[in-house]
Image (tube, rainbow, N blue to C red):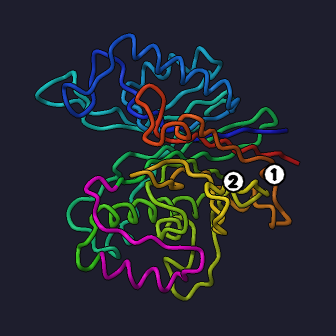
Amino acid sequence: MKIRLATFNLFQFVKPPHSWYTKKEKFTNEQWIKKTTWIKKQIKKMDADVIGFQEVFSRDALKILVNDLGYKYFETTDAAKLSKNNPLIFVSTTVAIASKYPITNMQEVKAHIPSIKKHNFEGFFKFSRIPIKATITLPNEKEFLVYVSHLKSNRLNEFEYVFNEEDKLSYKKELVNKALEDKYSSSLKRRLCEASSLFFDIKKSKKPCVLMCDLNDKEFSITIDALSNNKYHDEKRKETFILHDAYHQIEHEIYNPHPEQKEILRTPTSYFAGKGNVIDYIFVSKEFNKRNKQNIAKVSSYEIYDDAIRSNHDGSLLTSDHAQIVCELTFH
């Protein structure tokens, strides 16, 4: 049996006459038809069984759209907030999940208070977007958890470190801890609190799980350690991981925008100031890890749908400014 899972940042999914953040930021009816037509084509092309969505404002419109494409099950954990001064302006966004298989349970992901205190978070903590934790039941009655998240973005363009594959966790923590203590980046602090809360929720879960997310952080970032690495949370532990990047579970063709360079790059899922970054991910638990002899399924493909951002790095409001990721699991 094969299951295909996808993560899809919709880029301001706001049905007119509503707008996002300011009164002028909205689609005309013609633009909305073009955008939803493109989204439908992408969903058909991706051919996923379960999709996690980010940047969902008009959830009822999305529910109708995915229902028309055969996704009978649709859930959100929150509703996008409207401005108190203008009920036609959305001031927050949400995540959503659509599935062809029954969503048999929805649970809350709670903030992990010890982690909030450990990161010296000031004030009342809440997720910037409430994550989804959904139980999917397959025809063979097997169950697994699907988390959908959209972590805190770096809206203020605060200083944040960029790490590479060679950087050790101790080095990353040393630099980042100084940044957090000196209050260089409140966005990073919130993102690490969100990732840590997800880590502890996933760790205590007894079911196999998949996390589909817009991480809003780059490859090799410390956010990924907070999300997956036991040692990040306990120095006494070895580097063992509760989640594994599905990308690394299979072999890939190498993306190299400049053949004369020796640098080997992972295909970007988003661009900022012309530079490509990987910020969209699908992570899998040990039950889907190819190195685990007791796994119940393996990642059989990992596909990146980046046509829209390859031709236009800034993305288009009529399409998206993110690539879509599809991971296929083949069960034994």
Q: Residue at x 65, y 52 (%)?
A: 209
Q: Is residue 199 left or right of residue 86?
A: right
Amino acid type of the residue tagged 1 in the rendering:
Ala
Q: Say whether residue 174 is magenta.
A: yes
Dot in front, 2 or 1: 1
Q: Which residue is mark 2?
A: 208
Amino acid type of the residue tagged 2 in the rendering:
Pro
Position of residue 179 measured from the top left corner of the image (x, y, whole percent): 30, 77
Q: Which mark is residue 297?
A: 1
Residue 5 vs 225, above or below: the answer is above
Circles 2 and 1, Cβ within 8 Å, touching? The answer is yes
**Front in this rendered view, residue 290 or 34:** 34
Position of residue 186 measured from the top left corner of the image (x, y, whole percent): 27, 65
Residue lying farthest to the top in this orientation: 30
Q: Is residue 292 left or right of residue 27?
A: right
Q: Magenta span covers which residues?
A: 154-179
